[in-house]
Image (spheres, rainbow, N blue to C red):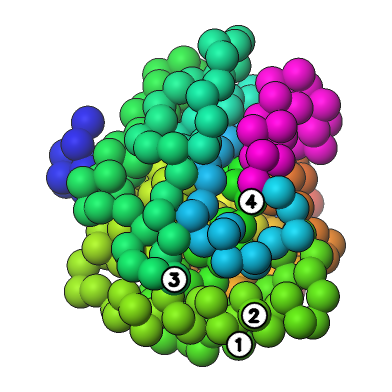
Amino acid sequence: MTVQDVLARITPASAAAMADARAHQSRLTKPPGSLGALEEVAVRLAGAASTCPPPMPEPAALAIFAADHGVHAQGVSPWPQEVTLQMVANFLAGGAVANAFAAQVGASVTVVDVGVAADLPAADGLLSRKVAHGTADLSLGPAMTVSQAVEAVEVGISVAESLVADGARCLITGDMGIANTTASAALICAFTGRDAAEVTGRGTGIDDATHAHKVAVVRQALHVNGIPESPLEVLAALGGFEHAAIAGFILGGAAARVPVILDGVIAGSAALAAAALAPAAVDHCVAGHRSAEPGHTAALDHLGLRPLVDLELRLGEGTGGLLAHPLVCAAVRVMHEVATFDSAGVTEKQP
């Protein structure tokens, strides 16, 4: 499916289904509002699915989009670029934190090579969808061409379509790419208007000098590329192949009316692009957690999303989204299984 095809299929949340969900919540055997944010999650998913109660968001499928970044040459990360390739191998071997968390919640794991700088051998669980061997250096000019950005977005769309066709009823975003928090910061600046110093974090853990340099690199990228008018041009100028693919993954989930749990700052910056392309796509997203990266808070605020978990995570891979999945399921299970005051014979609170 092309980008234009999927955009035409995305519709806003159903106001009627959301109203039905709120009314149903008010009849359940609990004090009104007593489940806090979980009640709004259930309402949100009802609106996204256009039915109340919403379908159970399981089984879940995690897609880890992997790619490399030309801006790594600017010294923005202490980790060598080959770690991207090595971590892909670790995902495929089942040895990463994301694998452990996925096993905990029963989620499948699919790794997508959308732009790793080396050629990967075929392996179970790996989809080879390489657009190019890493992006160009975004601090010197556009990270990719617009046609490459479109190709990467369509990779994400096709992965979402395939996972949903295989039975997934919840999609979780994952990422891997050394230096991808630099691209994320640049995207967040472009889409939110925030200053680079406000949204550029320490990524995998950098010292003060490297952080100051990273902020300067983000500012240079914004100066060299400007702020293009179209979301796809912004993605091409400042993003990574995994950002574009995750944006497509979100759009694909929204078109299928399947909820998408967003992970951290990489997913947040990609969701900004998806929302710029199709504002209604946000109606189908749940913020799994709040990353320790400052840009993630800026992205979530701009998207109007409230994170379910705040554990100071900054790993990526989809780990925060995976941790949030049982909470999303619990929110929906309440709608299906908790008795109403009438059915249980419980006296309601008096006016």
Image: 50 above or below 186: above
Q: Quadrant of the C terminus?
A: bottom right
Q: Are marks 2 and 3 in contact (CB under 8 Å)?
A: no
Q: Which mark is residue 336?
A: none
Q: Which residue is mark 3?
A: 139
Name which of mark 3 and mark 4 comes first in the sequence: 3
- 125 or 101, nearer to the observer: 125
In the image, is residue 96 part of the stretch drawn in magenta?
yes
Residues under labels 4 and 1: Cα distance?
20 Å
Name which of mark 3 and mark 1 comes first in the sequence: 3
Query: Which residues fall within the magenta stretch?
Result: 81-104
Q: Which residue is mark 1?
A: 197
Q: Which mark is residue 178?
A: 4
Q: Residues within 10 Å of mark 1 (few under 14, many from 20)?
A: some
Q: Residues within 10 Å of mark 2 (few under 14, many from 20)?
A: some
Q: Which residue is mark 2?
A: 213
| Three-letter amino acid code at the position of disc 3 | Ser
| Three-letter amino acid code at the position of disc 1 | Ala
Name which of mark 1 and mark 2 comes first in the sequence: 1
Q: Position of residue 316 (x, y in %)?
A: 69, 50
Residues under labels 2 and 4: Cα distance?
16 Å
Residues under labels 3 and 1: Cα distance?
16 Å
The residue that appears at 46% across and 15% down in the rendered structure is 166
The residue that appears at 64% across and 51% down in the rendered structure is 178
